[in-house]
Amino acid sequence: MKVLRRYLSGQIAAAVAFVLIGFLALFAFFDFINELDDVGRGGYRLQHALAFVLLGLPAHIYELMPIAALIGSIYALAQFAANSEFTAMRAAGLSRRQALVTVARIGVGIALITAVVGEGLSPPAERLAQQLRLTAIGASVAGQFRSGMWLKDSQRDAVGEVRRLRFVNIGEMLPDGTLRRLRIFEFDAEMRLAQIVEARSARFVAPDAWRLSEVETTRFTETETPGAPPLLRTEPGRSSEFTWQTDLKPELLGVLLVQPERMSGLNLYRYLRHLQENRQDAGQYELALWKKIVYPLAVIVMMALALPFGYLQARAGGIGYKVFAGIMLGIAFHFLNGLFAHLGLLNTWPPLLSVSIPSIAAFVLALGMLAWVDRTR
């Protein structure tokens, strides 16, 4: 039985790797064609486009692994069925439960690889790719508004009470993390405007400060006068440098370069906490974090979904028909993932439920198909 499991595992793993390489080649070709439109802009050359495409491959590995696992497993199992190898394995004592456990073990290994790529390899590669592209073109990153990106930050005391509330406007962020056209509107605990800081540029200084250059400040103070309402006085100031301490670190601002779905789980968690502490809408990032946790498990579900195809004999359809069915199932799973993610955001469903429904539905379908082929064989 150990020999059978080793043989089954080896064939399925080889088929999954073959399908994944094929998908990566196809997606890399389309990405390269898409990048050719920007070749010639600024200093962006053919070698930069090629490097950008190669750095994007880890993200594609993460996104395509469940579909590759499904199609590769169906291909390997369909070959076993066509050559009557699966029939021989069952005659040798490989029960349906043992086959499911064997396939699940392979899926766990591939799921771990998917998690490692998605957490440790894809996010830095994606960020490096965007930095390379922006640097070569000579562009910068701006927010969704004409004035740039707006962020909310707070300064708290030892017991967690808000001492200062700050609204930060970043005009643009360069690929190296430098901020330009920075404006900070600082309010006190009673929401009275206390200070406005404007800087031409800012660079991060570890562990928790930014060094602002060419700074103009305007302080607002109230002056008490007997028998009259308090007067608001302004105190303008200028300095070549100013140190600004904040929790807004480059890792949090990395959301400008990398889409939430392609961020690491750690950075997603940090940015999510920052949004929650400042009472901002964090639905999109909470959904992306749970998807990051659940998505690798979809590999196991997809491989369980492929197992029933091994019980279908050649007369039930050739290998091509079964692979085509696997492609259709993979496309359906991909679209269901996107559909329920959007439905979850629109209807404020629990993020874990939104990202889990497609995998749960696929697993129920796999168990139903296994029960059906078991009755009809």
Image (cartoon, grey):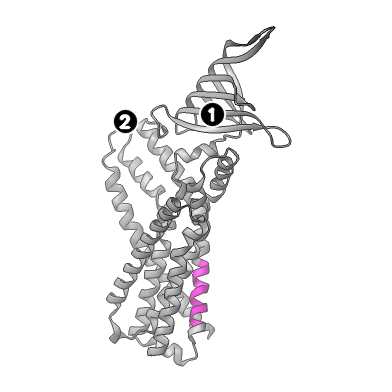
Quick one: 95 or 149, which is closer to the camera?
A: 149
Q: Where residue 2 sits: x, y (%)?
A: 54, 83
Q: Which mark is residue 167?
A: 1
Alpha carbon distance from label 2 to label 1:
34 Å
- In the image, residue 47 sits, relative to residue 241, either above or below, namely below
| Mark 2 surroundings within 10 Å by alpha-carbon count, few (fewer than 14), some (14 through 19), many (20 or more) | few
| Mark 1 surroundings within 10 Å by alpha-carbon count, few (fewer than 14), some (14 through 19), many (20 or more) | some
Residue at (47, 58) in percent of width and height: 354
Element under disc 1: strand
Q: Where does label 2 land, which residue?
A: 42
Name the amino acid type tagged 1. Answer: Phe
Kindly indicate the quadrant of the structure image that contains residue 309.
bottom left
Query: Would residue 137 be counted in the magenta stretch?
Result: no
Query: Would residue 107 be counted in the magenta stretch?
Result: yes
- In the image, residue 284 sits, relative to residue 321, either above or below, namely above
Residue at (63, 26) in percent of width and height: 190
